[in-house]
Amino acid sequence: KNQVEQSPQSLIILEGKNCTLQCNYTVSPFSNLRWYKQDTGRGPVSLTIMTFSENTKSNGRYTATLDADTKQSSLHITASQLSDSASYICVVSVSFNDYKLSFGAGTTVTVRA
Amino acid sequence: GAVVSQHPSRVICKSGTSVKIECRSLDFQATTMFWYRQFPKQSLMLMATSNEGSKATYEQGVEKDKFLINHASLTLSTLTVTSAHPEDSSFYICSARDRTSYEQYFGPGTRLTVT
């Protein structure tokens, strides 16, 4: 069973609108949680990284939140642009020195004009 | 920021031939590099972990004799797909772990098509 679950699987939004993606994880012990953006045919690019003690982290129009108690994270995209169309992947790592990353299946976001 | 490159970005080969994919960390040293495979509409799946100067560690179900990994230096790892078959067609992505910060950085991926 995947230890990182993302929802929704895909969504379509109009340009300029906001959207929120969800990530629930069961990975333990938890080290950090990352959100990546993956354009079609490209490698993942890091958007945010949060440790256990951080509740929110912003990167431009992207804001990630983390609730380590409920093991939930969200990624909020504000004022979406056509270039935001991509797959957004939630990735959780077990401990600081453990290289094993647990990947969510991703949420495919399509922004339409 | 840290940059990881992959070469080639895409390759088409015939069944039975071998293909080599390079992964380089351009501005940092990586004692550990990782090779992932990604099928359409699926997430990345770790294939193997490449450690500089030692043998790679393969995930369960990944044939080490088919996917040869060499990590000859702190900035270069190679993945060779031997005797490629059409089912090996996939998107191969590497990542490199900075030896000082432990952060992982992903390459842009290599699209392999076996005809």
Image (tube, rainbow, N blue to C red):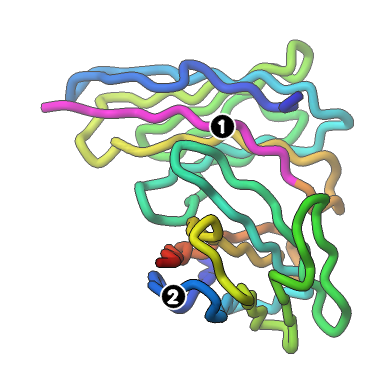
Q: As rendered, which of A104 and A15 lies closer to the eye?
A: A104
Is B6 situated above or below A99? below
Q: Residue at x 66, y 67 (%)?
A: B96
Q: Residue at x 73, y 83 (%)?
A: B74
Q: Quadrant of residue A81?
A: top left
Q: Secondary structure at mark 2?
A: loop
Q: Position of residue B68 (x, y in %)?
A: 72, 76
Q: Residues within 10 Å of mark 2 (few under 14, many from 20)?
A: some
Give the quarter of the figure containing the N terminus of chain A: top right
**Tag 2: amino acid:** Lys
Q: Position of residue B49 (x, y in %)?
A: 77, 63
**Tag 1: amino acid:** Ala
Q: Position of residue A11 (x, y in %)?
A: 34, 19
Q: Which residue is mark 1?
A: A105
* Chain of the residue under label 1: A
Foreground mark, 2 or 1?
Answer: 2
Query: Are discs 2 and 1 located on one and the same chain?
Result: no
Q: Secondary structure at mark 1?
A: loop
Q: Is residue B68 left or right of residue B18?
A: right
Q: Which residue is mark 2?
A: B14
Give the quarter of the figure containing the C terminus of chain A: top left
Q: Quadrant of residue B102?
A: bottom right
Asked if the residues shown at circle 2 and circle 1 are in contact, with their CB atoms under 8 angstroms apart, the answer is no
Q: Is residue A31 visible?
A: yes
